Amino acid sequence: MSRFRLFIMLFYIIWLAGIPRPGLTQEAIAIITQRDNTINSINLETLKLVYLRKLMLDSSGNRWIPLNLPSSSDLRQEVSGILFKKRPEDMEDYWNEQYFQGISPPKVLASEEAMLRFVTITPGAIGYVHKHLVDNRVKVLKIISTAEDN
Amino acid sequence: MKVLGATVKQRFRLIVCCCLHMLAAGGDFVRADNTDNGYQLGRGYALGETGITLGGYASTHLQALGRDPWNWNISSLSAFVSWDSGSKLRFFSETEVENALSTNDNHNLTTNFTSLHIERLYLDYLLNNQVTIRVGKMLTPIGQWNQIHVDPLVWTTSRPVATTNLFSNYASGVMLQGTVLLGKRLLEYSVYSDYSAVLDPSTSRVQGPVFDNAQGLRLRYEVTDTLKLGLSYADFALLNSTSIRNHLLGMDLAWSYQRFAINSEVVLNMKDPGTDGRRYSHDADELDFSNKSATLNAWQGYIQGVAPLVNSVYAVARYEFFDQDNRGFNPANRKFGQAEVFGLAYRPMPPVVWKLEYRLGKNNAQLAPDGLLASFAVLF
């Protein structure tokens, strides 16, 4: 093998290794809310209802504001699989029917940092980020490990 | 040189191949930077942070039914206005222009059949997670079709007789509704009391059965991730026959797996003429309740299957049956009707659907005549 070909292949392999692949996220996911929220934990069944907009109020009677990442995000795909066993695209029919009833799907934020910032300043907001990104701006309600969803 | 030339070509091919793959993979990053909060078809347009969302749907029908000349119309232009600012109070309204433009018997365009309706207008108050109070005009919670009946959300242009023939599609009054967990599964419920005769001034202009007053209950249980079962009951009187109480019992099923779906509804309506067994009249027809077995009960129902064919094209088939115990029908002509619908639906994206179907049947000329129907609908 020529050195040129070897160089190109090595470069390509290194570059590929740096690309996050859908469904390959191994890191735990943190479900987060505002620090002032009186709720300290949430289970997956309740979280599913919050994200389906079937459960509108938290235990203090305040409105939940569920947040999503863009549907192309690997993390969004993973969370959708855990909660609904469906891809975000497969939820379109459900949301069309809800829209007909005047109910909108969760608000979408562009990135995990945007999710952290929005949750920090918004009472009732609930979202998800990779565990390693969690800091003291937010409260963690649940950690979902890959072992749990599989 | 030849060897050298081949080496250069191979290197060029390798570099191009790698670059193309990088570009293809890199596209994911570009898309990931966008948010989904801009206008999206089927989601409406949010007016800033006001909590107000504007949207609606449009549909157009082309049909050639029975011996009637073919007909085209813009069947619905509907506007939704919803308000949800994050408080416990929410508002929703739907205003529809029906038959905004249509063809007459001579196939000339006309607006003679145009009408404006307020389809829904209600306030929701979230009492708690299990109870929401709804006040206003709403869709009657009987079965599944009536609550999502608009063209972009259903699979056929024609509507099953059982979903519209025996009860009012709208109720005006108060409803308690909510979702509770039964085990790990959802149970949705609605309990309502209707006072259309008092609260809805538009009832006299509506075609089909209209509640004078009604009370009802609906339950829907999520048996599995793919199967939902529903049960509906309503006790009501219709306008123009207020001395007759109707007791309607309905059952429905919705099963879906990947892109396959089966839906079914069955309703049984029992008329109670009261203790005096008197006759009542509607238009020129009379129903004689002295022969109760012949006239008191009416069964109607359908079962529909949907299966994907290629890409976004689906095959749809439906079987319907219906006792034709409806106002305006002479009891002497009552017959058990049946209809079958075979069609195709093309959904290039979820809020957009093109449909083509053929319907045929037996004793169906009045309620579901034979013929061809086609439509286009979009939720916006």
Image (cartoon, coloured by chain):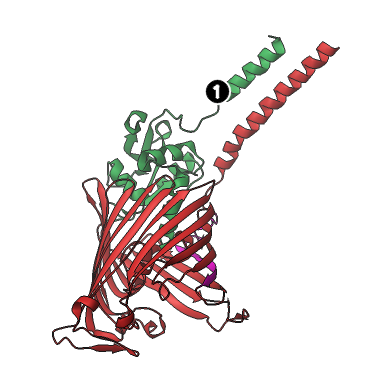
Chain colours: A green, B red
Q: Residue furthest right?
A: B1
How far across and how far down the image is residue B314, in percent? 49, 51
SS label for mark 1: helix
- Residue lying at 49% horizontally and 44% vertically, measured from the top left: A71
Determine if residue B306 is in view.
yes
How far across and how far down the image is residue B281, in percent? 28, 89
- Residue lying at 33% horizontally and 34% vertically, measured from the top left: A143
Direction from residue A14 to residue B290 in the image, left or right: left
- Residue lying at 79% horizontally and 16% vertically, measured from the top left: B6
Q: Choose between B207 and A86: the one closer to the eye.
A: B207
Where residue B244 sits, quadrant-wise, is bottom left
What residue sits right under mark 1 in the picture?
Answer: A17
Q: Choose between B249 and B94: the one closer to the eye.
A: B249
Disc 1 residue type (three-letter):
Ala
Q: Bounds of the magenta span?
A: B38-65
Q: Any magenta on residue B137? A: no
Q: Any magenta on residue B41? A: yes
Q: Is residue B35 above or below residue B125?
A: above
Quadrant location, the C terminus of chain A: top left
Where residue B202 sits, quadrant-wise, is bottom left
Q: Choose between B69 and B166: the one closer to the eye.
A: B69
